[in-house]
Amino acid sequence: MSKKKKEDKVKNEEVTSETEVLSEIEQENLDLKEEVKKLQNDYYKAYADAENIRKRQQRDFELSMKYRIQSFAESILPAIDNLERALLDESDTVKSYRDGVVMIYEQIIAALEKEGVTPIEAINKPFDPMIHQALMTEVVEGVEPNIVLEELQKGYMIKDRVLRASLVKVSQ
């Protein structure tokens, strides 16, 4: 074989080899671009998940702060009920005790109101099953149906949530 043919053959091999190397590099470049896209997508998903978790924790924290007094308020309500029963006694022999009970009652109510616990107004209001629990009904002349006639046990709200429904007697 002549020298020229050998040189041409070597050049063809070099060109073929360079083309193969170039095509391998291009394929590797495409593969790397695909991997970058996949990693970017994974990053965005992880970031969105982290943001959702942060928002959910913030919302849970705000709700727990808003209703943090609920269990205390539920446990103190029976004491308030007993104080109210004691206040119904109007006899003069227990006047000084009654005055003390009135002061205690007013202090407890003020403390609860400071924390957002308020009594539910029931008497002469339309019956609302979301805040009232009917224990009795009675037909009363001159009173529209579904009006609360008597409150048997006072109900309470904590902010916008029912802490305890009012036990009531309702007109028919």
Image (spheres, helix red, strand yellow):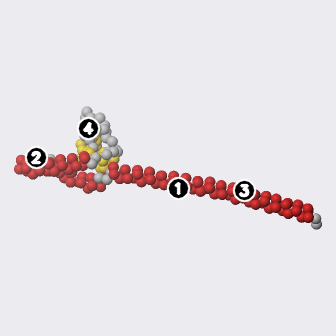
Q: Quadrant of the C terminus?
A: top left
- Compare marks 3 and 4 and give the one earlier in the sequence: 3
Can you identify the residue that label 2 sits on?
Answer: 90
Which of pointers 4 and 1 lies earlier in the amino acid sequence? Answer: 1
- Whole-angstrom CA distance, mark 3 to mark 1, is 30 Å
Q: Residue sitting at 55 percent across and 53 percent down? A: 44
Disc 2 marks a residue whose amino acid type is Glu
Determine which residue is flagged by label 1: 46
Give the CA distance from mark 4 to mark 2: 25 Å
Q: Secondary structure at mark 2?
A: loop
Q: Is residue 82 visible?
A: yes
Type of amino acid at the residue the image marks with label 4: Asn
Query: In the orientation shown, which residue stands out farthest toward the bottom?
Result: 1
Q: CA distance from mark 4 to mark 1?
A: 56 Å
- For label 4, the SS is loop
Q: Which mark is residue 124?
A: 4
Type of the residue with mark 3: Glu
Quadrant of res 21: bottom right
Name the kind of residue labelled 1 in the image.
Answer: Ala
| Along the line of sight, the residue nearer the viewer: 43 or 123 | 43
Q: Nearer the viewer, mark 2 or mark 3?
A: 3
Check disc 3 and report the residue beneath it. Answer: 26
